[in-house]
Image (cartoon, rainbow, N blue to C red):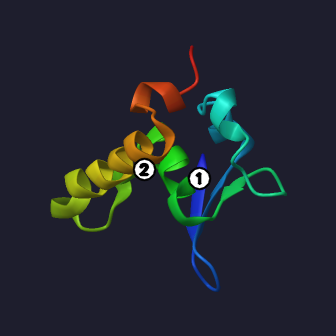
Amino acid sequence: MAWHVTTPSHAGIWVTAQGMQLIAPAFQKNRTADGCGWFEDDEFAIPYVALDLHQYHPVVESRAHARAVAVNVLTTNYNATPEDVRAKK
């Protein structure tokens, strides 16, 4: 598994080393101090889009909308596209 989502006290997305390899290095600087999470405000969009996490949204009908919101955050706040946040192969 390349990711884990938990919200017991503060929402966040934690990404494994395997998952980190799928995120462009330029966007890895937004990680938390432990190097594997994104907490704050709009930062969720980086791993969410890079790892296509929308496909795991529990409400199938909401998946496209969830991805659109994350892509909008990338475009608006980071001037980035989904291709920008994915590591080049």
Image quadrant assignment for residue 65? bottom left
Q: Is residue 23 above or below residue 39?
A: above
State the SS at label 1: strand
State the SS at label 2: helix
Residue 1: give x, y in percent of width and height: 59, 49
Residue 64: give x, y in percent of width and height: 21, 51
Image quadrant assignment for residue 13? bottom right
Seen at 54% across and 65% down, the residue is: 41
Q: Is 82 positioned to the left or the right of 41 in the image?
A: left
Residue type (three-letter) at the residue carrying disc 2: Leu
Q: Nearer the viewer, residue 26 or 76?
A: 76
Kindly give the residue lying farthest to the left in the view shown: 61
Q: Is 28 positioned to the left or the right of 62 in the image?
A: right
Q: Residue 53's mark? A: 2
Read off the residue under disc 1: 3
Q: Is residue 14 above or below residue 89?
A: below
Mark 1 Cα within 10 Å, few/some/many (few <14, many 20+)? some
Q: Do the residues labelled 1 and 2 touch (CB within 8 Å)?
A: yes
